[in-house]
Each structure stands twice: as C-alpha cells, then as structure tokens.
Amino acid sequence: MEKKATLTLPDGKKHEFPVLSGSVGPEVIDIRALYGQSGMFTYDPGFMSTASCNSTITYIDGDKGILLYRGYPIEQLAVHCDFLEVCFLLLYGELPAQKEKDEFVGMVTRHTMLHEQMLDFYSGFRRDAHPMATMVGVVGALSAFYHDSLDINDPRHREVAAFRLIAKMPTIAALAYKYNLGQPFMYPRNDLSYAANFLRMMFGTPCEEYQVNDVLVRALDRIFILHADHEQNASTSTVRLSGSSGANPFACIAAGIACLWGPAHGGANEACLQMLEQIGDVSKVGEFIKQVKDKNSHVRLMGFGHRVYKNYDPRAKLMRETCHEVLGELGLANDRLFALAIALEKIALEDDYFVERKLYPNVDFYSGIVQRAIGIPTSMFTSIFALARTVGWIAQWKEMIVDPDQKIGRPRQLYQGKTQRDVVPIGKRG
C-alpha cells in the first residue's frame, strides 16, 4: 500500500502527498504537487531537508560515518581499487572486469593531451593567477575546441565528453601550476598511470627524467578516490543546476569548479594547514583548544565536523593512514605539523566539549598535510580537489540528463521586499 503524508494548512484544508522510499536512507515526501494544490511553497534555505533529485551514485549516512559509491564502502574501494577503476564504477554503476578496465584506461590515456592552441590560453593570465581561476577559464573553453561532444542528447557525445574531462583535467591543473612557476609545460606520457602522470606534469622538467615514487603515486591516487564524489554537495548541485538548462558539459563542469573554489567548500584543507601553522607547536595545543571553546575569541577548529557527518568521517581514517605512509617514505615521520595534528586530534576526540558536539576529524584535516609533504603548494589544493571530483560531477550530470523527471532548476523564494508601488517623478522624490 502506498504511503501518504498529510499536510494540514492554516485554512484547515488537508493535502496528501506520496511518501517515497529509497533503497537505503530516510523516506522522502514528494511535494511536487504542493503549489498546484495549495498555492503555497516550502521554505528550506540551504536545502537542509530537501531532496533535489533521484540518484543511484553515492550514499552517505552521516550519523554512522558511512560513504558508499554505487553501494561499495569507501574503505574497500580505497584499499582494493585505483582511481580509474572508481571512475568506471561511478560512470557505469559496476566495477570493471580486467578487459573493461584496460579499455577504459586506454581511452582515458589517449585523451590526456590538450589541443595545442589551448596552451595559448595560459599566457593570457597573469603569472600569479590562482590555479582555480585558470582552470575555470580553460575548462569552460574546452567547448570552443571539441565541437564533436556538445550534443547532450547524443549518448556518444556524452561519453566522449566524459572521457575528455576526466583525461584532460590533470593536464589542465598541472599546466596552471607550471605557468605560475614560469617553468616549461610538461606533456602527458601514455606509459604512466593517471596519478603518476599528474605528478610528472607537476614536478618534472625537460632537464632530467622524473623519478616516479610508487608510495607518493598511491597516496595521490587515494586522495583522488576519496574526493571522487560526495552526493549532492554545493558544487555537484551547481553542475546539475547548470546542466538542467541544457548547457554543454564543459560549461557545467566549469561552473562546478567555480563553486568548489569557495572557501566554505573546497578550501577547507588549506584552512586546516594554516590553522596548524598558526598553532605552531604541540605545547600550544592546550591553549588553542581553550580559545576554540571561548565564544568571544572567534578562533575556529578547522578540519573537524562536517555538514553531513555526525561521526568520524570514514575518509579521514584512510587519509590518516596515508599520512603515515607518505611521511615515513619521505623521512618526515617526526614532521612538526603531523605531530601537531595528532595531538590536536587526540584532545578533540577525548574532550567532552567536542564529543558532545560530534566534532570529529574530516578528510581535510589530513589531506593538506599529505599534499604538503608531496610538495604540492597550498594554492593547488583546491585544484586537485576539482581534478578528483570531475568524475563525480560528470557522472551526476549524465544521470541527470537521462532522468525523465528532470526539469530546469527553478527554486522558489519567500519574498519580503516592498509591495507594488508607483514611480514618483524625480523632482518630487525625497
């Protein structure tokens, strides 16, 4: 029997709405007919209680600290799979067999180069331009070069656009970094893995052969996996909203990058690193914690707590392990910031103030330390986030395009401005 929810309005009239059930997670009240039946809207700033779409890609249970990609726990994917396997999973719904993986990796590898004229775009930016500003411009410009993948109603075009975005994003990000430095651009190499290729394009030079470090490659690959998708966050919702208008996929992903650039979304790992630098030493952690608790100090504990997770972020546990591996490999086991992070985490996890508020470490708490150890500057942290999240964005965009219930996004509003009034001639105003 179909479940119904009854809403009683101020005029006493009752309206029934279907209750929809997902495969897991809370039930959802379908209020699409609300305005037609009652002439009223709902009010939900930030979409705290609103499901904006129907999706089969990613599931989060924040209270239990669960993150699933297509049903697979992130803990298993991060240990047993590489990033391109996860890309295949997000795009197609299943993990690939070996032949499927080989074909997929080959396709991505063959699309890593940019059209040569696109390199001229970089010289149009100032040398000190933020890499995210460069990426927004270059990704948006892809639609000016790849006309054969702009028909969003053609499945083959959508497929080619997905390959191009996943393949070219590391090249676009690495070139932005090289341009900042004033170093020669490094072209991708087809004999390297996805993460190894990115590291070489970032840190290699034409003067000498870049030495691939497998521990660093695996660490970066894990960062990519952990950031590949995260349900209907701000940037993903931006991609979907842009796509709902029929915009081409390159424009939609550029919009997602622009949204991710916001410090409240993609800049958290950089903020965590800055916080640790400001604390400076393990001996000062106690005083810092006191300031965090003081409502009048305006000092914030970065890297703890999450809009969705009310438990230990499962990605943070994996990133913590990666931290140990990378710092051990590079001889930085006694790294000052990592020791500081461990001390801060210990106090926060045992202190009633943080435990009661469920302020557990999130993935950003450790990912900044790992990237810093690898040699990635803080200005590139959000660019790497965008690189990894591209596959999630494109998977969500593809899902939205074929959803029969999808309509152009058009949120309503609660208007509290002036009511209708007449224009007074300028000589009579005031």
Image (spheres, helix red, strand yellow):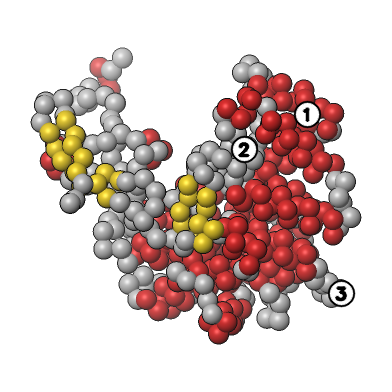
Q: Residue furthest top?
A: 430
Q: CA distance from mark 1 to mark 2?
A: 17 Å
Q: Quadrant of the C terminus?
A: top left
* In the rendered image, the vertical position of residue 185 relative to residue 351, given as above or below: below
Which residue corresponds to the image point at 11% horizontal and 26% vertical from the top-left? 12
The image position of residue 20, as x and y in percent, is 27, 50
Q: Name the amino acid, label 2.
A: Tyr
Q: Name the amino acid, label 3.
A: Glu
Q: Nearer the viewer, residue 255 or 235?
A: 235
Q: Earlier in the sequence, mark 3 or mark 2?
A: 3
The image position of residue 261, as x and y in percent, is 57, 48
Q: Quadrant of residue 10?
A: top left
Relative horizontal placement of residue 381, taking residue 307 as reference (left or right): right
Dot 2, how many residues are within 10 Å of its Cα: few (below 14), some (14-19), or many (20+)?
A: many
Q: Nearer the viewer, residue 273 or 174?
A: 273
Dot 3, how many residues are within 10 Å of its Cα: few (below 14), some (14-19), or many (20+)?
A: few
Residue ID for mark 1: 285
Could you say whether the residue bearing mark 1 is in a helix, strand or loop?
helix
Q: CA distance from mark 1 to mark 3?
A: 43 Å
Q: Name the amino acid, label 1.
A: Val
Residues at discs 1 and 3 in contact (Cβ within 8 Å): no
Could you say whether the residue bearing mark 2 is in a helix, strand or loop?
loop
Which residue corresponds to the image point at 83% horizontal and 33% vertical from the top-left? 282
User: What label sits on residue 208 in the rendered view?
Assistant: 3
Residue ID for mark 2: 360
Which residue corresponds to the image point at 61% horizontal and 75% vertical from the top-left? 112
Residue 125 visible somewhere in the drawing? no
